Image (spheres, grey):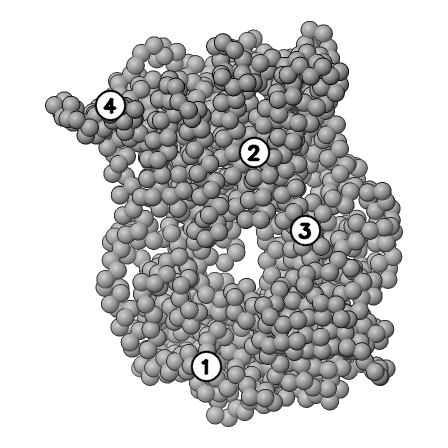
Amino acid sequence: MERNEFALQMQNVTKRFPGVLANDRISLDCKKGEVLGLLGENGAGKTTLMNILYGLCQPDSGQILVDGQEAQITSPLKAIQYGIGMVHQHFKLVDSLTALENIILGIPSKKPLLDLAPARARLLKLCEEYELFVDPDTNVWRLPVGQQQWVEILKALYRNAKILVLDEPTSVLTPAESDQLCRAVRRLTDEGRSVIFISHKLREVMEITQRVTIIRDGKLIGTIPTKEATQKKLAQMMVGRPVTLVRKPRPVIDKKEPILVMKDVTVNDDRGIPALKNFNLTIHAGEILGVAGVDGNGQRELAECIVGLRKPSSGTITVRGQQITNVTADPSFIGFIPEDRQKTGLVLDFNVSENLIIKDCKRAPYVKKGILQYPAIKKHARSMIKKFNIKTPSGDVKARTLSGGNQQKVVIARELNPEPVLDIASQPTRGLDMGAVVSVHDTLLDERNRGAAVLFISAELQEVMALSDRIIVLFRGEIMGDLDGGTADVSTIGEMMLGQGSEVGA
Amino acid sequence: MRVQKKPKFIRVPFIGELALSGVRPIIGILLGIIAGGVLIALSGINPFKAYGAMLQGAFGSLQSFSNVLVRSSPLLLGGVGVALGIKAGVWNTGIEGYMYLGAIGAAVVGIPALNLPPVLHIALALIVGMLFAAAWGLIPGFLRAYRGVNEVTTTIMLNYVAIFLTSWLVSEPQPLAEIDSFYPMSKLFQESAQLPILMKGTSLHPGAFIGLAVCILFYFILRYTPFGFQTRMLGINPNAARYSGVNTKQKIMLIIMIGAMMGGLAGAIEVTGLKRRVYMDFVTGVGYESVAVALVAGGNPLAVIAAALFFSALKAGGATMSIQTGVGAPMTSVIIALCVLFVIGVGISERRRLSKAVDKDEPDKVGAAGSKEDPNVI
Amino acid sequence: MSFDMIVDWLQATLRWSAPLIIVSTGEVLSERSGIINMGIEGIMLSGALCGVAISFLTGSVLASVLVTIVLGIIMGAAVAFLTVSRRTNQVVTGLMLNLLALGGTNLLFGLLSESRQTRVTTFPVLFPEAWHNIPVVGPVLFQQPVSTLIALILPICLSIVLYKTNWGLNVRAIGDNPQSAATAGISVKKIKYQTVILSGIFAALGGCALTLGEVGYFASGGMTAGRGFIVLAAIVVGGWDPIRTALACLVFGAADAAQLRLQTMESIIPYQFFQMLPYVITIIALTIMVKRSIVPKTWGAPYDPRDV
């Protein structure tokens, strides 16, 4: 009987969500003792694929073979039984419990009483084996982030995972810790275990993996041996797509006055880790500055601190000389199209007309003598619906009932109609169909042509290149490069997005 | 998964919004009434007869209806105070306490002989009552808005403090206390500080009408003023509210204090209109019933009117039901509690689940440009 | 204040604290798993009546205890169904259950009018008579009915269960981060049902201890007098830890015993201020704890399994 060389085979896995084909007949396999890299942008479908592998969701079709045998993975518990261990990008730890308690959590036990001593001994042995040291009896919330990552990995190892999936494992690690991790991975594969390594950091992928699988738009693009890959090639496979967006012609604007000036800004994310470090940026009037980069490298914090929703811990932000300390009350100053329109941009249970005036609800002509003037509000809505081509039966329907594209148009109408001096568009085309995307692009270009400064953040490289006068690439909160929009090259930008900068990358 | 069922009654103005949130609570109330009927039957009494007696007791004559109105006064005011909080996303469950404080405030003004014309004396008593209650509401309001302390716990704790505070103030030898009485109570209010009786032979005072007016006023404020607009926004989406310039902390504290003032007004009216004194422990659960009223009404002030009247009819009719058919008097509380439990078990949970789900940001499920749009994601 | 009065007060403290501690045993578990059972006031009241009624009907305290447990299971299951499966607002669910229990107990008590005149069989005092007269320790400890002694042991048992068993670990995990617990394979719903039903059982038993512990009768309209809420308060002050919660119950029980005695005495501080004490302490404690993030993260929030 031939010894099976594959630890894992996923064959023709397909998963459809409402309106989105997340996985389109994707096949990948991972040999025993191999590190397989998995590359793909956010939205490419790799998270869905991994969720299927871990039993968090079920595929519509396709099959999974573990060590040659077909596996029905209906829940995380089943996945663990099959020897699949998953280390999530966003930790699934219970902060108030100790590291040891987290590691043994959920393991069925015959004894009612906690018997920590043998578990502790086993854990310490694992720590030594893989050189991933944690104090078993410290509460997780007290552990530094790197050690929390080790706890996640040890959780899987404790359950004897033969196939370990690491999702962006080094995103929170220092370079020294990343090296530690790489060494641990090597030890794992020496033992015959397999690792699926999901990462955006090209350098690491090139160093650690034996083969790389690239996924894009829900489809498998290809799997190549790492030896035969170059960073350029990987970037192109991951990011390049048939050109569907042509660069739009635009009038040249001279003498651009600086509108937004950010000096040495440091901003923390929700975990307290700096998302932007000593960040410097200037945007001029009549210019679209495109911010390229994989989602999660500081884009959201950048947008929020400029708008005033997030306070920087140091540095200054000025718009036309005025310092930004809080959300501005003047709608004609900054227009903000947030990346999560349903959370920050819209009040879904309000109707369209009401959503259009949430920033103006105390101003004439919508208020007279302290009373809301609904005729004026509705009239404004009608004119906005017409001007921005919002497909809705009337202004009286709840925003919740509109399609994504039209919801976005409502936000755009509200934010851009007052002709602000600075527009911030954060992932404005996310979830929109082609027609809506084109309409957003045209709108932003019109804004630029009338003299506004536009900050355009997007994870879709194609549209950044089609639209921007200038492009910066964000990686881990730093600017990897500042390029001219007309002449920038896809693969250069792609490499920068993955950490290879014209300056030394991380 | 598609989100909304097709709503009914949308064209009818005013009522449209009411009915939208009203279909499910009505089912809950019906279930509660049926369950009550089952309990009555179990105790050996014909439920139809019992409910019939209840209807008669509530609506049978002008006199009985006046009882309904009298009982509805605190439910209307307390209910609308809590409802305002619900619209803003806070649970202001301190009505019991606010009523006591309102009563104390009214007593401070209403007991001494101030030689004022009744209109002024009463107005002063009510206003001072509201101010005392506002001060009481400042505590949970501040703690919730600026310190993130759960307002339900603080208000319920303060309810008990208010009970004991009142008990102390109306027990001798406090200045407000009645001398030589068998039960701790305050001195009698001055004639000029007592609300007039509107119908001879009843205890009908203007309280219910004040309550009705306040409910309509609050509906108007919520729908037609910027303040109400921002309040509703805050309750649905605090993030968007913050972005659009609402000072969320200040607003939350203010909303809790306004709710407190309504509770205070309710208490002040109870003592100036119905009881004419402040008795120890006089509130007897009405504060929590007004929370139930607000919940069943879904926070809508006009629906509060319906719910308050409904519960008051139950209570007023309950006395008659008890006398005529022998059903125990506490059965009305049981029926009210069952109605609310069925309402929340059946319906309200749906709305909360929806708004919670929509708040989720789901970037991974969204396709790249070129794929079809996502509908509203669950 | 004479020595006798202090001993008497200590004895009363233990007696009044016992029902509180019993109720808190179940509720600590429930809150640790993320569900506030605000209905324990009503369940306690129901247990109080149930204990007296069954004791009156059968003369056996054992039967009372058993029936009370069944009652606690039923009421706890109702709360669990609403708050866990239907994800209702926990506060309103509890408040309405209290209202239901208040009306229900008044109704049923009306039917049992004969019992008003008699004192029913109460919990026995297990210690021999000879020990009762030992100075101090005699009255304070050895004259206590068995329910008080059980109450003193419960916090230790609860501590062991919560911190030293697998189930207790799961409970703590769920209360902190249900999504992570679910990913680890734990059935969040099942455990929440278990803790809430336990809170029902212990709340009912606590009420039973209140009436059968000494007084032996039930008075309508105020038997528990907000003691359920005092337990909720004690849990907050005790930082959701079994032993500290029991200590808080003792402090609150001491205040309760003090105010009862002060009602008949001349004192500078009005007895009502002792009544207020537990509630004021709770508000201050909660404010401090929120600042220090001691409050369990999912306290009072409904858990949606689709949020994983």
Residue B94: assigned label: 2
Instruction: Estimate the x, y position of residue B168 in percent, counting from the top left.
Output: 49, 22
Marks 2 and 4, how far apart in space? 41 Å
Residues under numbered marks 1 and 4 in contact, where contact means CB atoms less than 8 Å apart: no
> Which residue reaches farthest bottom?
A228
| Camera-nearest label, 2 or 3 | 3
Marks 1 and 3, how far apart in space? 42 Å
Instruction: Estimate the x, y position of residue B8 in percent, counting from the top left.
Output: 72, 40
Marks 2 and 3, how far apart in space? 24 Å
| Residue B311 visible in rendering | no
Mark 3 residue type: Asn
The image shows a total of numbered marks equal to: 4
Residue A442: assigned label: none
Residues under numbered marks 2 and 4 in contact, where contact means CB atoms less than 8 Å apart: no
Q: What residue is drawn where x is 45% and y is 53%?
A: C292
Q: Quadrant of residue C123?
A: top left
Mark 2 residue type: Gly
Label 3: element kind: loop
Instruction: Estimate the x, y position of residue A353 in percent, counting from the top left.
Output: 80, 51
Callout 1: chain: A
Q: What residue is drawn where x is 44% and y is 28%?
A: C273
Q: Earlier in the sequence, mark 2 or mark 3?
A: 2
The residue closer to the viewer here, B167 or B226, is: B167
Q: Which residue is mark 1?
A: A175
Q: Quadrant of residue C211?
A: top left
The residue closer to the viewer here, A132 or A278, is: A278
Whether C72 is drawn above or below A223: the answer is above
Q: Which residue is mark 3?
A: B247
Neighbor class of circle 4 (other Cα within 10 Å; few <14, some 14-19, many 20+) is: few
The residue closer to the viewer here, B144 or B50, is: B144
Say if labels 1 and 4 share a chain. no
Image side of residue B318 versus residue B117, left or right = left
